[in-house]
Image (cartoon, rainbow, N blue to C red):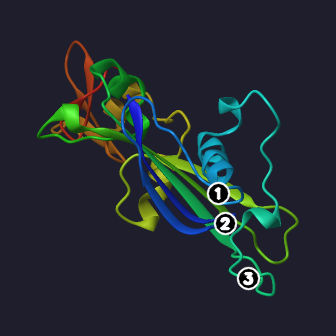
Amino acid sequence: MHLSKVDIRNFRSFDSLTVDVQAGLNVLVGRNNTGKTNLLNAIRHALGPSASRGESLWLERDDFFRATPTVSPATSMSVTLTFTGLSEQQRSQFYEIVDFDLANLADSKAVIRFTAEWPAHKKQANIRRTGGPVSSAENMDRHRLAPPRFPSADSMCRNASNSAKSANVGRLRVSCGPASYRATMDSWSCSTL
């Protein structure tokens, strides 16, 4: 697995920046004050505090893009990281953030989205990390980077109709059989519940 794409909107000196990263060694070269460190800090913010051992990650108003010193800063920012080359084990380990390519699982990619908004009346930013495929803003809550919470298969099967013996929870479908429970997400098999 490797970071293959970084998409930044309204972060520090970047109004809009997309960087394609190759597998292996990548080198950032540029004059002073051109945004090399800003690119690395955007990646650090997207990955979260556990990805950093040094100084703490704090967002300040100055971290939001400002076109000129006389213009007020943007009120929202986003950083999207796309990882490709996932092994079968990595696809199963990070399934919450994987955008599965069902035609060719080897082409699946992991996506992490970091968004921050700074409302005018607040003293700090509202930060959100999500992942996986998202087609619209209302689907964003389904892909939060937190362990999913589902009812137990027992309770779902007890509540399912006797004829169907299955139930849906978001994108998760649990089928109830006589000996075991099996979960599937869009044709991709998960572990037995």
- Mark 3: amino acid: Thr
Q: Is residue 110 visible?
A: yes
How far apart are the two marked residues, 2 and 3, measured between alpha carbons? Answer: 10 Å
How far apart are the two marked residues, 3 and 1, measured between alpha carbons? Answer: 16 Å
Q: Earlier in the sequence, mark 2 or mark 3?
A: 2
Left or right side of 153 for 43: right
Check disc 1 and report the residue beneath it: 35
Q: Earlier in the sequence, mark 3 or mark 1?
A: 1
Check disc 2 and report the residue beneath it: 13
Residue closest to the far bottom: 70
Q: Earlier in the sequence, mark 1 or mark 2?
A: 2
Q: Residues within 10 Å of mark 1 (few under 14, many from 20)?
A: some
- Mark 2: amino acid: Ser
Residue 145 or residue 14, whichever sits in front: 14
Do labels 1 and 2 touch, CB within 8 Å? yes
Provide the secondary structure element on which disc 2 rests: loop
Q: Is residue 192 visible?
A: no
Q: Position of residue 159 (x, y in %)?
A: 35, 38
Q: Position of residue 133 (x, y in %)?
A: 35, 51
Left or right side of 69 for 18: left
Q: Is residue 186 above or below residue 157?
A: below
Provide the secondary structure element on which disc 1 rests: loop
**What numbered label is drawn on residue 68?**
3
Q: Residue at x 82, y 36 (%)?
A: 55
